[in-house]
Image (cartoon, rainbow, N blue to C red):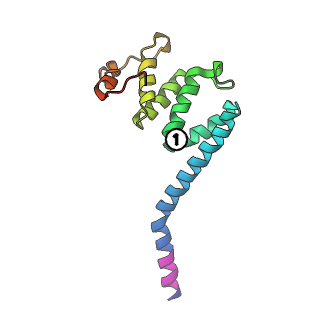
Amino acid sequence: MKTRFATALFLSTLALSPVASAQSSAESAQASLEQAMRYYENGQYRLALPHLEAAAEAGDAHAQEMLGFMHAMGGIFYPGVALDRREALRWFDRAAQSGQPVSRYMRCALQRTPDYALPPMPRARKDCFDHFADSGISPAQ
């Protein structure tokens, strides 16, 4: 009887562990974002990076977009953050895939900037600004 109860308890714990894991992951991402924002608001951008990255890797579109801007602007606007165009494009792309229209615009704009020395855009992205015309979103919004 005791063994059955222990087995049932163990199995129910296993069944709930993905839910608990997803909740703790979401809570951890939220905590990372909150810590990142404290550093960011105090101008400690270099210290904000690992916390933003943790939230962004967990799927937070706002963190992804912030990382895109921080890497696109580098130390000019964000002292302690290296200018890294490939990282900027990577994060803007992830944020755009998460539904952030500004990130989609930035991804398109950066891909068309000659000094970004990146591989050419595939045909599907050649007219990426057309997305705004088709969706009724003005890039100026």
For the C terminus, which image quadrant? top left
Can residue 83 be seen here? The reply is no
Question: Is the magenta region chiefly helix, strand or loop?
Answer: helix
Query: Is residue 11 shown above or below 115?
Result: below
Front-most of 87 and 130?
A: 130
Q: Which residue is more in the foreground, 141 or 44?
A: 141
The residue nearer to you, when weighing 52 against 1, is: 52
In the displayed image of the protein, which residue is found farthest to the bottom? 1
Mark 1, residues whose alpha carbon is within 10 Å: few (<14), some, or many (≥20)?
some
Picture residue at 64% right of the left edge, 39% below the top: 36
Label 1 amino acid?
Glu
Question: Taking 47 as reference, is 8 above or below it?
Answer: below
Residue plotted at (37% across, 19% down): 121
Span shown in magenta: 3-9
| Residue 116 image point, x, y percent | 49, 15
Where residue 15 sits in the image (x, y, percent)? 45, 67
Asked if the stretch drawn in magenta spans residue 8, the answer is yes
x, y percent for residue 68: 53, 28
User: In the rendered image, which residue does mark 1 sit on?
Assistant: 57
Q: Is residue 124 left or right of residue 19?
A: left
SS category of the residue bearing label 1: helix
